[in-house]
Amino acid sequence: MPQNDGPVKRNARERRAERRAAMVEAAIAAVREHGAAVSVAEMAASAGITKPVLYRYFDDRADLQRAVGLRGAEWLMERMAPALAADTGPQRQIAAIIDAFLAGIEEEPELWRFVVHNPAERQAGTEIVEDVREQIARLLAQLVGARLREAGRDSGAAEAWAFGLVGMVQSAGDWWLERRTMSREDLTRYLTALIWDGAAGVLGDAPQETPDETAPVLQMVPREAGDGA
């Protein structure tokens, strides 16, 4: 067997990977132009090729959608990374994470719909969304758990709360993307208020960070007279 097969095959794999990545970027451009219902023919045309050539690099439409979903997930995580890693107070960090997510889906609404809500290949997108949601939730679980331990509280529920919060923000984001009945800033404040109010209940009298415009107090149930209102 020739000894130089390794480098040759490796170069061929690298060229194929580069070509595939370029096709994914072209597919994303087609999604932006034509919307979440974009056809494979339109994605191939965006790459300057035909469908048969496209399918030399992808098994089927679901394979292409997974690749687009993974690229979109990478982009969203890059967008959210500064907020997730920020060394700041918990209230401000909650607001930053929510705003980063909402900003991401606002900037790429058709890509978000293509990956998450495309009825033609729902399963292909669902697994990507679940992976991203798990990544964010596990990071949040670490943050929540650390805050609970700092307060001398049981951190056993941190992961469950984190997954619940991520699901709530995603659902609210989907609703907002379709309705647009309020600004992104307002939705960020409302969600932060709801989450922070719950955190304050768990942590006791959690201090309000300043400035307090970040998350207005949300009193879901009026306090009884004499309850410290």
Image (spheres, rainbow, N blue to C red):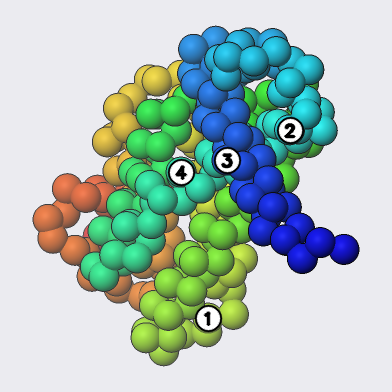
Q: Quadrant of the N terminus?
A: bottom right
- Tag 1 near tag 3, CB within 8 Å: no
Report helix, strand or loop for mark 4.
helix
Q: CA distance from mark 2 to mark 1?
A: 46 Å
Q: CA distance from mark 1 to mark 3?
A: 44 Å
Mark 1 = which residue? 155
| Number of callouts | 4
Q: In percent of the image, x 72 and y 61: which residue is there? A: 4
Q: Label 3 is placed on what type of residue?
A: Glu
Mark 4 and mark 3 lie on one chain; the one further toward the N terminus is 3
Is 205 on the left-hand or right-hand side of 211? right
Q: Quadrant of residue 162?
A: bottom right
Mark 3 = which residue? 18
- Tag 4 near tag 1, CB within 8 Å: no
Mark 2 = which residue? 57
The vertical placement of 59 against 110, above or below, is below
Q: Quadrant of residue 171?
A: top right
Report helix, strand or loop for mark 2.
loop
The vertical placement of 48 against 156, above or below, is above
Give residue 226's position: percent from left, percent from top: 28, 65
Mark 4 = which residue? 75
| Residue situated in front as seen by the camera: 84 or 201 | 84
Mark 4 and mark 2 lie on one chain; the one further toward the N terminus is 2
| Residue situated in front as seen by the camera: 197 or 112 | 112
Q: In percent of the image, x 68 and y 46: which residue is there? A: 12
Report helix, strand or loop for mark 1.
loop
- Tag 2 near tag 3, CB within 8 Å: no
